[in-house]
Amino acid sequence: MCPRRKTPLLMDQLMLNCDLGEDESPEKTRQLLALVDAANVSCGHHAGSPEKTDSTLRDAQKAGVRIGAHPGLSAAGGRGEALPTEAAFAQLLEEQIGSFGDAASRVGVKVDYIKLHGSLYHGVESQPALAEVYLDFLRRAGPGMAVVSLAGGIFARRCQDAGITVYREAFADRAYRADGSLVPRSEADAVLSTDAALRRLRHWLASGEMPTQDGLGLALAADTLCVHGDHLEAIPLIHGIRTVLASNDGSALYL
């Protein structure tokens, strides 16, 4: 995992992002966009639809947030155990990012980054061949395309080594294991309540160590913090996160 930073990370540098354009209501989409800095907008395959993608992009434009493409697998809501072949993954990226780019062009917004969804997000951590396919796609996308990837993970380091802009992502609402991986949603207590998430956030921001389900502290450096849009308490949780960040009174955070 990443060592703790030697220099402070100021609070306004921690970008708050949210997965949107999935199956949330239009009202919830707009409420969340008013609270976050960046929207990971579904490409319409693991959840949502092309129409939902378009409407979310328009709402994101009005909110003035950064926009990321959020491609995923169609089966099992993008969270199944089966991963694609290298060829199928390459085709998925070309098709989903291509159609997302077309939608962004129609709306008149810039795509700032890509964040894989679910099984793909974790698959590039565990499968070197899939990681190489993704790296090749990002290289061809050019220097203007960044990536959001697991903080402390292998893929984030590979992006840094390749000169690709990467936002190392921590999760506000998901439990961690001591090795830095997320506790699978199928397990108990994998998704944190608002109170538990805010207690953990305060500890992490003060110490640089993320408490884990194993009872250990994980030294974790991050550039962006995710709250999932399908979290039942997403709106109060993000309000709470904003309050925690504001209460730091501008002092530095060692992440």
Image: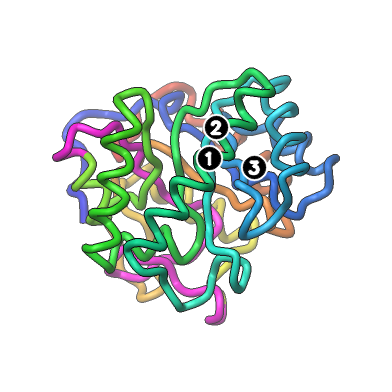
Which contiguous range is marked in magenta?
160-188
Magenta stretch holds residue 184: yes
Which of the two marks, 3 or 1, is nearer to us in this view?
Answer: 1
Taking the image as shown, residue 252 lies to the left or right of residue 65, namely left
Residue type pointed to by label 1: Ala
> Which residue corresponds to the image point at 45% horizontal and 40% vertical from the top-left?
114
Q: Which residue is mark 2?
A: 101
Say which label, 3 or 1, has the lower sequence index.
1
Residue toward you, 91 or 172: 91
Q: Are marks 2 and 3 in contact (CB under 8 Å)?
A: no
- Contact (CB < 8 A) between labels 2 and 1? yes
Q: Which residue is mark 1?
A: 69
The amino acid type found where label 3 is placed reads: Ile
Name the one closer to the observer, 156 or 212.
156
Looking at the image, tell me whether mark 2 or mark 1 is earlier in sequence order.
1
* Local SS, label 3: helix
Query: Residues under labels 2 and 3: Cα distance?
Result: 28 Å
Q: What is the CA distance from the residue labelled 3 to the residue labelled 1?
A: 21 Å
In this figure, which residue is indicated by the disc labeled 3? 238
Quarter residue 206 falls in: top left
Q: Residue at x 72, y 55 (%)?
A: 233
Q: Label 2 amino acid? A: Gly
Query: Image quadrant of residue 196?
Result: bottom right
Q: Secondary structure at mark 2?
A: helix
Q: Does the magenta run of residues contain 253?
A: no
x 51%, y 47%: residue: 95
| Rendered position, 8 above or below 121 | above
Q: Residues within 10 Å of mark 1 (few under 14, many from 20)?
A: many
Mark nearer the viewer, 2 or 1:
2
Question: Is 82 placed above or below 241 here?
Answer: below
Q: Is residue 58 visible?
A: yes
